[in-house]
Image (tube, grey):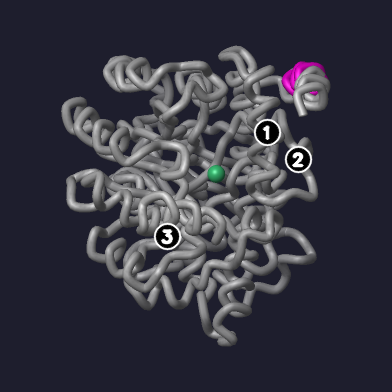
Amino acid sequence: MTRDATLVADLDYVVTCDDGDTILTNASILVEHGVIQAVGPRESLQQRAEEIGATVRSGARRLAMPGLVNLHTHLSMTLLRGLAEGVDLQGFLHKVWAAEAAVMDPPTVELGARLAALEALTGGTTTTLDMYLHPQAAHTGASALGLRHVTGPIFFDGPGPDGLTWDRRLDSLTEWRAYVATAPGPVIPLAAFPHATYTTSPAHLAELREAMCDNTFGLLHTHASETTAENEEIRARYRCTPVEVLVDAGFLDSDVDVVLGHGVHLSRSDRATLAEAHAAVAHCPGSNLKLASGALNWRTCRGSGVRLGIGTDGCSSSNDLDMWQAMRQAALLARLTSGHPEAAPATEILRAATIEGARALGLGDTTGSLEVGKRADLVLIDLDAPHLTPVHDVPALLVFAAGRGDVDTVLVDGQVVVDAHRSTRVDAAELLSVCRERAAYAKTAADSES
Ligand SMILES: [Zn+2]
């Protein structure tokens, strides 16, 4: 009898991203009911694979690694790609929010999330932390393609592009909890997304913290210290830093996992606070470089004990969801900002983009590494390419030479969602055609609003 089982056999390499950064050679992976049952030599797995009728998938000239975790993005903004060019963060927000208010209704958000999930998954990203409007629509779209899509209600003081009042937003926590309990797709934590301390007041943040505790929400994600202008604005309003606003609201001494998007301009004291609270920063080097927001100093953050993951940010600021580019940018920027070629070793970058991102989301026991008992979120890289030959240093190959075009196969929760570079869940040509049509309308609306 055929069961829900797969044997990925005879892999050249298995990059586990376990605590010892183990890299196995000539190994196989057995997956059953979505869970990694064994990783090791084929001979040791063959009998069990036959007993359970596992489908055998060749891993010859392939490398297996955990799926990438994009720790900060706004998926549905794929449809706004390229609409706000040559501007800083303030100019960007002005232009993009007008377009969002005009076009981002739930069906459009769902469509944008489907496009994003297709881009993310075919590029080897299996988990995303997605802050956006109409989270249920986004989740419906992204999970249909198989993405482990962490999202939830977004909070601003004002109505925002979705027009919701503050009280309505607080109510949405209860609705979201009910939705997640039966939602399609892989398991996700309950998360809330106040946009930033410059768009959500201290009083509202304190209210949100209480409401999150009442509703057992365990994850908070917000933008913080992305630019010096943001820091100056918060200093002028409240005489403190964005992180200190979050401290005052009670987020950093609670059971809530906190992930800050960007964290480019953290003070020494902010870094100490975040380290003590085990909070994480989602480093988005591509967005920070493109909007000229500044450069996070990886070495200083790590030295302070701040946990670091990696994100792409949304496609309207950094234009794509390419985590391979983000890894490489993070590694190179770390060397530039520190003046040390040994800053941010490739192994550390790989961990940030996999297991450290998963842990930041409270999903460290579920995904982020290839270990027995974890859900099978894994990527196969085709090594049969000139730019991946020869293999002298596997982590360096992945961070400095590999790209998303090398992603051949992707499993999420043990299901094959990308096979031979193609989504198994959607007709890509048809989806792209619908997106082109809708994006043309978004551009017209954005131009007329600005
Ligand atoms: Zn962002």
Q: Residue at x 56, y 14 (%)?
A: 106
Q: Quadrant of residue 391?
A: bottom right
Kindly report which numbered mark, 1 or 3, lies closer to the viewer in this rendering: 1
Which stretch appears magenta?
431-440
Q: Which of disc 3 and disc 2 is earlier in sequence?
A: 3
State the separation of the CA atoms marked 1 and 3.
Answer: 39 Å
Q: Residue at x 44, y 76 (%)?
A: 300
In the rendered image, which residue does mark 2 sit on?
84
State the separation of the CA atoms marked 1 and 2.
Answer: 7 Å
Q: Position of residue 10 (x, y in %)?
A: 53, 55
Can residue 284 be seen in this snapshot?
A: yes
Q: Which of disc 3 and disc 1 is earlier in sequence?
A: 3
State the separation of the CA atoms marked 2 and 3.
Answer: 39 Å
Q: Secondary structure at mark 1?
A: helix
Residue 162 appears left or right of 241: right
Q: Residues within 10 Å of mark 2 (few under 14, many from 20)?
A: some
Q: Is residue 215 above or below residue 150?
A: above
Q: Residue at x 63, y 65 (%)?
A: 328
In the rendered image, which residue does mark 1 sit on?
96
Q: Secondary structure at mark 2?
A: loop
Q: Position of residue 195 (x, y in %)?
A: 46, 38
Q: Is residue 201 above or below residue 402?
A: above
Asked whether 408 or 333 is in front, the reply is 333
Q: Are marks 1 and 2 in contact (CB under 8 Å)?
A: yes
Q: Is residue 197 above or below residue 212?
A: below
Q: Residues within 10 Å of mark 3 (few under 14, many from 20)?
A: many
